[in-house]
Amino acid sequence: MTILVTGGAGYIGSHTVVELINSGYDIVIVDNFSNSHPEVIKRLEAITQQSITYYNVDILDKESLRQVFTEHQISAVIHFAAHKAVGESVSNPLKYYHNNVEGTVSLLAVMDEFNVKRIVFSSSATVYGFNNQSPLSEDLPTNEANNPYGYTKIVNEQILTDMTIADPEWSVVLLRYFNPIGAHASGTIGEDPSGIPSNLMPYITQVAVGKLEQVNVFGNDYDTPDGTGVRDYIHVVDLARGHVKAVDQALNESKLAVYNLGTGQGYSVLDLINTFSEVNEIEIPHEITDRRPGDVAVCYADPTKAREELGWVAEKTLADMCQDSWKWQQNNPQGYQAGNMNG
Ligand code: UFG
């Protein structure tokens, strides 16, 4: 069975491709490489020992998408392709609504034309906004995001929900990710942010590798055990395996379902910095600075529903995440740009 993976060269997409192939699925990647590197394809081929079918196509380009659906018998789609920089979405909202919302509409229209009605969608814990209390469960209201990026996730969830109402043949699984970090055990694929990272783990690894001087800890006056922000960090390979379970379900049952993909365990900024230092035996200089606007104090999942309905639980520890992120960064100090791996 063939799964079309939009954004399959990206951070979460590439790890999901590996797990899909490990589970016996055939895959086709559609990616416009706007925030990913073609080198990923070679790395995926090395990991999986098979050739990877991919198209350099933008999901807004319906004619090219049609070509992909004509050339392959697609059973389901996992839709990752989207912009994801929260700060940029505030300064350039139209870029986000155009790409993330119109992109999904374009993809769904082509899927409908080809009678492919099974989709797993990359959503985010950001849909829970400011006003819900952790542990966050899927039935909480999700009508208020903190930024345009978050609103594109809310709107996409609504569009996909509406598809199932209009046509019960549609099978939709919305996956709300918490904070994915870590990398494939090989250290050959991982997160490769462009420019200065805005997320904590890639910032830490770039400090560790000497590209950045110190981590700025955004506030230590939150109502949390050590005053710094608490998040539910989840290993990207666990997250990827959650997608395999979700696509299995989408293929078996026509319904709308929504699941949190998190561990259920919150860790603070200082927990992450300290664990990284300990397990990798490397000092991470850091300094407390002002809060970052838009950050919530605490955000972690109630992962019960995914366990009960998908049979999925996150298995890897914070130490695993820190070791694997560091292995990836050490092997690839310049990300994918340098081409062949060092070391
Ligand atoms: N942080 C720092 N210093 C940094 C970066 C982050 O102290 O340099 C702190 C933040 O204040 C926060 C924690 O580290 O307390 C995690 O921040 P990230 O930027 O890594 O992650 P966020 O939780 O802010 O955002 C992530 C994704 C979003 C998604 C959101 C869902 O990046 O795409 O989770 O809750 F929307």
Image (cartoon, rainbow, N blue to C red):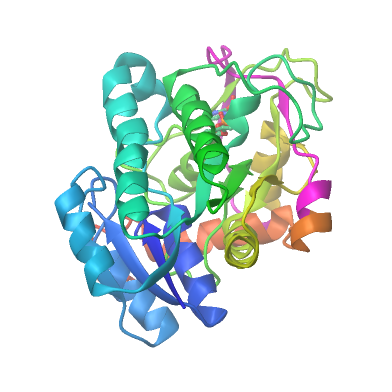
Left or right for 118, reference 137: left
Left or right for 261, reference 284: right
Q: Quadrant of residue 329?
A: bottom left
Q: Is residue 86 above or below residue 188?
A: above
Residue lying at the far bottom in this picture: please name it.
49
Query: Is 286 within the magenta?
Result: yes
- Residue in the picture at 54% in, 54% down: 169
Magenta highlight: main SS: loop
Q: Is residue 293 above or below residue 192?
A: above
Is any part of residue 220 visible from this angle? yes
Q: In the image shown, does 199 or 250 lie closer to the viewer? A: 250
Left or right for 220, reference 225: left
Q: Position of residue 31 (x, y in %)?
A: 27, 55
Q: In the image shown, does 146 or 296 lie closer to the viewer? A: 146
Q: Is residue 71 above or below residue 99?
A: below
- Residue in the picture at 43% in, 35% down: 213
Q: Which quarter of the rendered picture does the C terminus lie within?
A: bottom left
Query: Is 162 within the magenta?
Result: no
Is any part of residue 329 visible from this angle? no
Q: Position of residue 311 (x, y in %)?
A: 78, 63
- Residue in the picture at 56% in, 12% down: 290
Q: Position of residue 304 (x, y in %)?
A: 84, 48
Q: In the image shown, does 206 or 314 lie closer to the viewer? A: 314
Magenta region, residue range: 279-306
Q: Quadrant of residue 296?
A: top right
Image-quarter location of ligand 1? top right
